[in-house]
Image: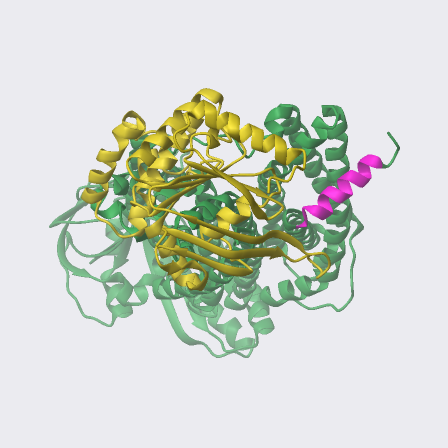
Chain colours: A yellow, B green
């Protein structure tokens, strides 16, 4: 059984006065295996963020099912949703979403504190995680004191500290300069190498080229996917940009 | 650009920011209305139709000054909160190509519009409510009520002038704020990374020290006379202390809690404690302002109601009987017996001629001296005028010499004394051992009595300084030994007085008329005895008028000012909630994404809100409790000596204000939740 199974997911946004409705997702089907590193690519408006929000249980699908490790997300009650998200999902945002009232350390602890963990246990987990992410020296700083790349690393620590089943990343390099982006992508690969499943939404070819599989979404459906297999990042980059070119020309790959 | 664009932008700006502007304009309207009413009651001649209302009128005049000053400060404060909310919009205009001068014009038109609406509204409301206020005023000062409707052109003009000046100053201030802000800062004004609040140990601890010093002084004060200066110092210390404690002390407290890891890393405390530090950094000052305003309201209302409610008792302390005849002079008079007997006779005859019976009479005759008391010795050589600045009022004391016979008559006792012995009664903060020296004479204490237990208490002139009663076996002989003491102006220090109080059971007007007759009789009769003899005859009815006008005026002033202060509180709370709402909006979005349930968030907000809500009112109750004893002592100056009543009034005020405050908080929290969710 796959870790994540998405079947027939549909999302329709109704116009305000019942007028025009927009189909953001028409019929999305895919699966993600444990330990995979999947990137979802698509242009703005293609529905990729909507999809991610549904996967993160931040949004409800109009139809279809999302099953994570045997649990059906679409049937979880609202009240249990927050706990589910906390225990099973790690979320990395484009704009970091760190709370400016906390130090980086406290930001990372937040999900654990909400889960009612003891401080000693939290510290133990962070002590293991921090060196790998290179943030040991930054823990006492406040978000406004550190760079974007450093913030994003803290945000990743926050996503990983709960040992989630899957890490969902929404344009994680979107707000970073190219050097920080490279470092971050390296980091993602390393994290994936440790066995962590990652699902990333991006429109950066470079970011996607690190993934083991890239899915392309267009007009609300999964249009195409490529596996990295044994290709290098550069080869993968080439494959992806070829595909994007085709997509842009309106070509039909099927 | 077309003419009329700026006024249009300004009007749109006000309309779109109604959430900020409506309460602001509402407050302006109310302030202008109250100012008009106070001015009308204090200065216009409609109040002259009431007899003898000058004290009450003076209170209203005083009130207009307070309104002008407070109005300026407060509107400045709210205006800067308003303009802060608009800076981003101005920044956008500036990006779109408007220069500072253009924006200045928008600010100008906004001010013109708010000025016009406030002025028109304020005057309409003020004039509309003026009759009601006038009736209320007449009621509390027990004056005649006229049902004529008055509009005072003078009051309208003054109100318009004063508030136009205030608005002009506010406009200049707004202009200054716009001018000194950069375009880019304008656009990003709400995004600037906020530094985490630092725990400032020095200021925090200093604040606590100031606050407790203020409390200590307030509690320690014994005598209202020396208290006045110390009271002011205590008040200032408490105010500054409140600000420092709420601004720095609270952050300090949060930081200490954060250091305690076992406490801090708990679901319930984690978010609350860290957000509280920020909240207090931003809102410490407004919470302190709310606290001070609330305290002022509590103090004003509880003291003025206590005075007003207790007016009849205070009056009775002041005038123990309906008619009070008094005469006396400085120096030693060996032949007072004949004068007094003659006068007593004359007063009784005239009272009976008027058709009144003499009831419950009290006759008091005494010699008195004032001096500086230190350790069983009353120094009467000291010249109070020379040493007035160095004088410790706690040590100023007045000595009343009574004849034993007189004393036995007043108390109904039959004590016996020999020469050199004395019975001692003390009222005030003085301790006397076995001997008392007054000037060069020494008295052996043969016994002690409580002066308040008998009619002898009516000799006490003032509750402000300490009083020593010395009962001797031969008053004339003792008094003669002090005959030669004079002060620097050559006036004899020794003084004697004769008082005759009694009830007559007449109508108020007759009582007043009778006391006038008796007063002129005293003057005629005593004239041959020389110029320095003084006399009067007073009636309780006449005094009652005075008391009611004074206390009623105070009460009315207290109520009007409290209303304004409370409205000010409400507005501060409201703006605070709105600005917090905007700041918290994005934060709660994040928390939700990370896995906080809506319930968790709501619980956390509620607990923070409750803390923020409770801080000012808790502090003001604490303030009130500490300064209540001094207020009691200050009220003694008005003849008010009823601590239980004062405490009751304070209790009721706290309750009423608490309910009002809670309702306000509930309503303004709704504004907050609407923004956050």
View extreme (right): residue: B2
Q: Give the side of residue B607 with respect to residue B212, left or right.
A: right
Q: Quadrant of the N terminus of chain B?
A: top right
Does residue B397 appear in this view?
A: no
Q: Is residue B433 left or right of residue B633?
A: left
Task: Point out residue B607 in the picture as x, y percentages from the top left corner.
Answer: 38, 55
From the viewer's perspective, is A90 left or right of B582?
A: left
| Front position in the image: B537 or B557 | B557
Which residue is located at x 17 percent, y 42 percent? B375
Rendering quarter of residue B132 = bottom right
Residue range in magenta is B5-18
Instruction: Point out residue B167 in the picture as x, y percentages from the top left corner.
Output: 70, 38
Our reading of the magenta stretch's main secondary structure is helix
Residue B549 appears anywhere in the view: yes
Apparent side of residue B281 relative to residue B56 in the rendered image (left or right): left
In reply to whether residue B613 is colored magenta, the answer given is no
Res B513 → quadrant = bottom right
Looking at the picture, how far across and down is residue A245, in whole percent?
62, 30
């Amino acid at each position: 059984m796959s870790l994540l199974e998405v079947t027939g997911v549909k999302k329709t946004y109704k116009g305000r006065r019942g007028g025009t409705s927009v189909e953001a997702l028409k019929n999305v089907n895919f699966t993600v295996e444990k330990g995979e590193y999947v990137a979802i690519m698509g242009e703005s408006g293609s529905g990729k963020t909507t999809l991610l929000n549904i996967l993160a249980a931040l949004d409800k699908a109009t139809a279809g099912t999302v099953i994570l490790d045997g649990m059906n997300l679409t049937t979880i009650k609202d009240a249990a949703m927050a706990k589910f998200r906390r225990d099973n999902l790690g979320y990395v945002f484009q704009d970091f979403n760190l709370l400016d009232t906390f130090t980086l350390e406290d930001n990372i602890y937040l999900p654990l504190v909400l889960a009612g963990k003891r401080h000693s246990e939290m510290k133990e987990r962070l002590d293991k995680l921090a060196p790998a992410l290179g943030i040991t020296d930054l823990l006492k700083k406040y978000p406004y004191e550190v760079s974007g790349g450093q913030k994003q690393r803290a945000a990743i620590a926050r996503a990983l500290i709960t040992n989630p089943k899957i890490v969902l990343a929404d344009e994680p390099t979107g707000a970073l300069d190219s050097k920080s982006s490279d470092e971050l992508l390296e980091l993602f690969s390393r994290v994936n190498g440790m066995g962590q499943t990652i699902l990333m939404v991006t429109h950066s070819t470079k970011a996607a080229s690190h993934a083991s599989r890239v899915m392309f979404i267009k007009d609300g459906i999964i249009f195409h996917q490529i596996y990295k297999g044994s290709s290098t990042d550069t080869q993968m980059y080439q494959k992806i940009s070829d595909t994007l070119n085709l997509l842009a020309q309106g070509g039909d790959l099927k | 650009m077309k003419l009329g664009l700026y006024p249009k932008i300004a009007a749109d700006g006000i309309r779109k920011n109604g959430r900020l502007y409506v309460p602001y304009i509402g407050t302006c309207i109310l302030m202008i209305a109250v100012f008009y009413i106070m001015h009308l009651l204090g200065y216009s001649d409609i109040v002259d139709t009431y007899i003898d209302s000058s004290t009450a009128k003076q209170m209203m005049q005083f009130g207009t000054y307070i309104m002008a000053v407070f109005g300026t400060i407060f509107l400045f404060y709210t205006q800067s909160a308003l303009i802060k909310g608009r800076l981003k919009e101005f920044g956008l205009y500036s990006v779109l190509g408007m220069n500072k001068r253009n924006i200045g014009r928008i600010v100008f038109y906004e001010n013109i519009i708010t000025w016009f609406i406030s002025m028109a509204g304020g005057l309409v409301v003020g004039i509309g409510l003026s009759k009601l206020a006038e009736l209320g005023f007449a009621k509390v000062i027990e004056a005649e009520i006229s049902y004529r409707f008055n509009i005072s052109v003078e009051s309208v003009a003054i109100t318009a002038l004063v508030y136009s000046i205030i608005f002009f100053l506010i406009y200049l201030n707004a202009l200054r704020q716009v001018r000194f802000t950069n375009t880019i800062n304008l656009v990003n004004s709400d995004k600037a990374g906020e530094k985490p609040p630092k725990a400032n140990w020095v200021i925090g601890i200093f604040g606590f020290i100031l606050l407790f010093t203020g409390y200590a002084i307030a509690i320690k004060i014994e005598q209202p006379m020396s208290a006045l200066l110390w009271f002011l110092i205590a008040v200032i210390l408490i105010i500054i202390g409140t600000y420092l404690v709420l601004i720095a002390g609270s952050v300090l407290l949060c930081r200490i809690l954060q250091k305690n890891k076992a406490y801090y890393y708990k679901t319930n405390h984690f978010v609350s404690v860290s957000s509280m530090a920020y909240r207090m950094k931003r809102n410490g000052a407004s919470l302190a302002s709310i606290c001070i305003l609330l305290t002022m309201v509590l103090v004003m209302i509880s003291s003025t109601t206590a005075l007003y409610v207790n007016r009849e008792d205070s009056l009775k302390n002041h005038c123990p009987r309906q008619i009070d005849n008094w005469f006396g002079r400085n120096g030693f008079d060996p032949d007072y017996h004949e004068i007094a007997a003659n006068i007593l006779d004359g007063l009784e005859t005239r009272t009976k001629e008027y058709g009144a019976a003499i009831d419950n009479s009290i006759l008091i005759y005494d010699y008195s001296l004032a001096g500086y008391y230190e350790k069983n010795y009353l120094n009467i050589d000291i010249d109070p005028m020379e040493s007035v600045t160095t004088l410790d009022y706690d040590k100023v004391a007045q000595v009343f010499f009574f004849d034993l016979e007189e004393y036995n008559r007043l108390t109904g006792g039959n004590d016996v004394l020999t020469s050199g012995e004395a019975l001692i009664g003390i009222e005030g903060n003085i301790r006397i051992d076995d001997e008392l020296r007054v000037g060069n004479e020494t008295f052996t204490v043969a016994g002690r009595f409580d002066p308040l237990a008998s009619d002898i208490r009516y000799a006490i002139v003032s509750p402000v300084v300490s009083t020593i009663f010395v009962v001797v076996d031969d008053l004339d002989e003792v008094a003669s030994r002090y005959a030669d003491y004079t002060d620097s102006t050559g006036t004899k220090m020794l003084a004697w007085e004769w008082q005759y109080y009694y009830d007559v059971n007449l109508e108020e007007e007759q009582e007043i008329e009778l006391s006038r007759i008796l007063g002129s009789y005293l003057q005629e009769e005593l004239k041959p005895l020389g110029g320095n003899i003084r006399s009067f005859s007073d009636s309780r009815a006449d005094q009652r008028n005075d008391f009611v006008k004074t206390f009623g005026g105070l009460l009315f002033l207290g109520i009007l000012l409290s209303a304004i202060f409370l409205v000010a509180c409400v507005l501060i709370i409201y703006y605070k909630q709105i600005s917090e709402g905007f700041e918290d909006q994005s934060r709660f979005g994040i928390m939700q994404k990370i896995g906080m349930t809506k319930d968790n968030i709501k619980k956390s907000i509620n607990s923070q809100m409750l803390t923020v809500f409770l801080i000012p009112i808790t502090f003001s109750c604490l303030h009130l409790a500490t300064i209540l004893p001094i207020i009691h002592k200050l009220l003694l100056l008005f003849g008010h000596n009823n601590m239980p009543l004062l405490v009751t009034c304070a209790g009721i005020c706290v309750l009423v204000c608490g309910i009002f405050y809670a309702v306000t908080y509930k309503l303004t929290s709704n504004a907050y939740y609407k923004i956050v969710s």
